[in-house]
Image (cartoon, rainbow, N blue to C red):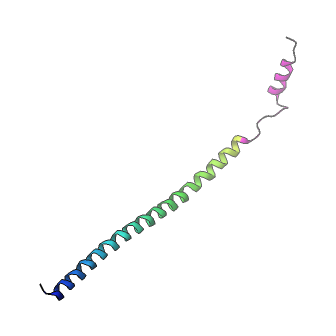
Amino acid sequence: MSRTERIATDKEQEETAMKRERSATLGRREFLRTLGAGATVAAAAATPMADQARADSDEKRKARYQPNSREVQTFYRVNRYPS
């Protein structure tokens, strides 16, 4: 094998190694890009659920005590009795 052939073979091996390295890098980049896209989709899908949860919590906080209702008036009247 002549020196020129060895140099050509070495260059081919370097190019092959660089291609493998580049494809591995692109694989990581593609993975991270996919991960980011998935997180974006998950956040977008969770937004309607958050709105629903907010509406439910507003409903739970709504004032239900009505001091002039018959049941409340009866409770206070009965509890005024001496024991």
Q: Is residue 71 above or below residue 52?
A: above
Give coordinates of residue 18: x percent, y percent: 31, 76
From this view, report whether residue 18 is shown above or below residue 75.
Answer: below
Task: Give the quarter of the image for residue 15.
Answer: bottom left
The residue positioned 21% from the left and 85% from the top of the image is 7
Horizontal side of 3 relative to 16 (left or right) equals left
User: Residue lying furthest bottom in this view?
Assistant: 4
Question: Residue most toward the front?
Answer: 3
Range covered by the magenta-colored residues: 61-83
**x and y percent of residue 45 in the render?**
53, 57
Between 8 and 23, the one lying in front of the other is 8
Q: Is residue 67 magenta?
A: yes
Compared across the picture, whether 37 is left or right of 17 comes to right
Q: Residue at x 62, y 48 (%)?
A: 53
Q: Residue furthest left?
A: 1
Please report the residue visible at 58 percent of the width from the left and 56 percent of the height from the top.
47
Is 24 magenta? The answer is no
Residue nearest the viewer, comparing 49 with 12: 12
Q: Quadrant of the N terminus?
A: bottom left
Quarter of the image where the C terminus is located: top right
